[in-house]
Image (tube, helix red, strand yellow):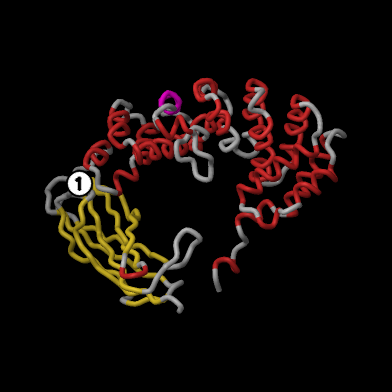
Amino acid sequence: MSDAKTYPLMKDILGVAAVTIIADAGAAASPVFDRTAFLDAALDGLDGLSIMERVRHIADALHEALSTDYATAIHVVGAIAPHLTHSFQAIAVTEFVARQGVGDFDRSMEALADLTRFGSAEFAIRPFLAADPARTLAQMLRWTDHPNEHVRRLASEGSRPRLPWASRVPALRDDPTLAAPILDALRDDSSLYVRKSVANHLNDIGKDRPDWLVEHLQGWDRETPRTAWIVRHALRSLIKKGDPRALALIGVAHGAQVRVAHFTVEPATVKLGEAVTITAELASLAQADQRLVVDYRLHYARSAGKTAAKVFKLKTFDLAGSASATLCILQVMRDFSTRRHHSGRHEVELLVNGLPMATAAFDLVCPA
């Protein structure tokens, strides 16, 4: 059975049931809200739209239902949000601000700070960043002191240079470091929710400006546990590439004094939907303890004899001097919307502190 038949489509989160919930919340919020006009506009052509297209489509339907001035409309939108039942419903409602409020900056910023508590306003802030990056980033910097973690996260998440599913912001595309003051202000935030966003934002920057990322993080106090956590996760893409500077920032040498006593991938042949077990035994060649970052690089077979590699985390740990450790992980070979598999030989490389140290392989058989 395919994933499409087993799991509902992402876009169906904003299907007929969600539209009805928003319609009922709007009708309950204010007599200004035209429930019938909203339903007619929101359901018209909804089936053929992707999840983010539905977000924008529903936001435009709200405009059809709120034929009044922006100040009144945004008050009604704010009253709708607490009665929604899924974050993506709230994201669609919040998108109203992005579609209608760019010309009313102060009122819109206040609305986004309120609405982000119910469904992140990370997408809705993007048109404001595109229209006036300096003013919007200044407002987002002020949000880093906000008592609500959702608002602080919006400051970081909304300004990510490569925010998934979001429109690109020209100023951040040209200089992905523009939001650095926001990240600096949040580097010891008490909320893991916020710290994850800061780490993801920094990881985005590292894809375009790896030198800047390493140099900037060298200036952070990595003795502070919360900051150290952000640094480790911000460097994950560079660490997977075996970047010596990134490894050094987390206290790991480039390469390790270890011997691979055993490395296998079993079984030798699997069908799509089945799993392989990857096992590695490492033996220390040093007297002192070593910090090890152990990953594996899977070379996926592609059409026409080509391959595409992806690095996966295995384990980061301290190996005692002259000691051994056995690591094991299960890798399920199944299709996703972002990855389709092909039959053929799949090589697996064991990476220790950024360097390949062993190779094994298996054959994958996919349905014709």
The residue depicted at 81 percent of the width and 49 percent of the height is 40
The residue depicted at 81 percent of the width and 29 percent of the height is 68
Q: Which residues are magenta?
A: 180-186
Residue 173, position in %: x, y? Answer: 43, 35
Quadrant including the C terminus: bottom left
106 up-or-down from 225: above or below: above
Residue 94, position in %: x, y? Answer: 66, 36
Residue behind mark 1: 290
The residue depicted at 28 percent of the width and 64 percent of the height is 348
Answer with the quarter of the image where residue 216 lies. Answer: top left
Q: Is residue 311 left or right of residue 16?
A: left
> Magenta stretch containing residue 98, yes or no?
no
The residue furthest right is 31
Q: Is residue 358 left or right of residue 201?
A: left
Quadrant including the N terminus: bottom right
The number of numbered discs placed on residues in the rendered structure image is: 1
Decide whether the magenta segment is chiefly helix, strand or loop. helix
Check disc 1 and report its element: helix, strand or loop.
strand
Residue 38, position in %: x, y? Answer: 80, 44
> Magenta stretch containing residue 183, yes or no?
yes
